[in-house]
Image (tube, rainbow, N blue to C red):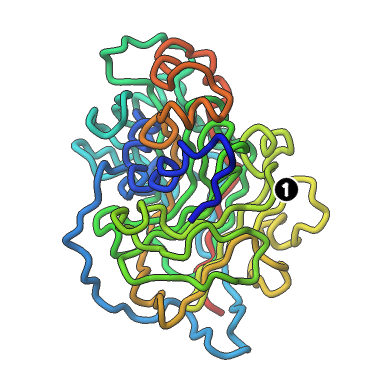
Amino acid sequence: MIAVRPGLAILSSLIMRHTAFRTLGLLSIFAHGAFSFKLFDDHSLRSHPHKHRNANVRAPLGPNTGSSSTDHPTWGLTDSFQGEEFTTSSLSRPCVTQHEDVSSRFYRFPSYYLPECSIGFMHSYIDMQTAIAKNLTRATRNRLFLHADSTTVLDPDGPGRDSIRMQSKKQWTAGVTVLNLVHMPEGCGTWPAYWMTQHENWPINGEIDILEGVGFMSTLILGPNHSALHTLNNCTMAPTRTMTGSVVSTNCSYNYLNNWNQGCPVRWDRKEIYGPSLNAMGGGWFVTERTSSRISIWFWSRKDKSVPPVVKQGKSPINTKDFGVPFAVWESSDTCDFNTMFGPENIIINLTLCGEWAGQTPIFNAAGCPGTCVDHVNKNPAAFKDAYWEIASIKVYSKAL
């Protein structure tokens, strides 16, 4: 269980089950255009199909990491995207929705309206052309920008504030993914997330949440940033692992009837790696490695002198053996076989507004935001001028050498 601080008891049940309703939140924030790496998982669906509980056993992911020589495999660069390359690469495809709009190599945009998918605040995704026309997405030579609308006062009965969700066309299994992030969305009512999953068969192929939070959540139980896994039932982690973060839960099951669908989060130990503090540092590098034996996440800020040269320079090949202790790590074992619980996944970067997590009034207020999330989002467009992603690059190393 999460330790609840005095005065925050009312938040515990809400926060512990927030993941079960990410769909609500994602739809909220990605209400309108999305560079989608694929759109559906618990971040974007109101509920997840339970009929997929009996997953097929998969072939091992990547190299056999059972021996010391392969505990840290070496990976070759297979996919690289920077600035305008996002619009011409094969990485992205739009989310699978009512309307398909496959217009780029890296991503695509969902276009649909699902008002039932958020608490008190409705969102509809716009297609890529609309997002470009409204200047909610743009690419320069070395940057990609994904914005929420920050100019429109909304009709309370309307579809909600436009936002973006990006999902890759391509899927990966084992390897290392490096996100070079310059700026992440910040502000009251925001729910940004950088994660990996496969929507169509969720949760058969698992989910990896790398960067996620709500509002100014440094005061919240799960704050500032938390990373998590979400899997089929019967996946538990050891309570003690070699990492700098803190275990919140060891049960990775998606079934919120058992654990509020919080998965098995790890709370990061540095409050500055989220929101305004992260942006003030100029962002940094989020590195995720997935093998058949473990999933690990590291971070280095922009000015950190210890950032590995291979990460900073985007070189190939890459090996994580000298990266130091990760912020978060999960290990495959007889209580959670990664070969069974994880399969091919898309990369997703999105921004939700309100929703089942960020939209809960106790959580909204605890983050230092007055009133209600719905009223704030409807009436204060200027409050979302900093609600944007600025991405320098994404590099995927998926070739085992």
* Residue at x 41%, y 29% (from the top left corner): 359
Looking at the picture, which amino acid does disc 1 mark?
A: Ser
* Residue at x 28%, y 43% (from the top left corner): 45
Asked if 160 appears above or below 245 in the picture, the reply is: above
Name the foreground residue: 86 vs 42.
42
| Quadrant containing the C terminus in the rendered view | bottom right
Query: Under tag 1, what secondary structure?
Result: strand
Name the foreground residue: 166 vs 375.
375
Asked if 384 appears above or below 316 in the picture, the reply is: above
Camera sees residue 399? no
Task: Judge left or right: residue 275 versus residue 87.
Answer: right
Q: Quick one: which residue is furthest to the front in this view?
A: 6
* Residue at x 62%, y 48% (from the top left corner): 180
Residue 16 placement (x, y as % from top left):
43, 48
Camera sees residue 355? yes
How many numbered badges does the structure rendering display? 1
Residue 228 placement (x, y as % from top left):
48, 56
Residue 273 placement (x, y as % from top left):
66, 44
The quadrant holding residue 310 is: bottom right
Residue 280 placement (x, y as % from top left):
72, 33
The residue where tag 1 is placed is: 301
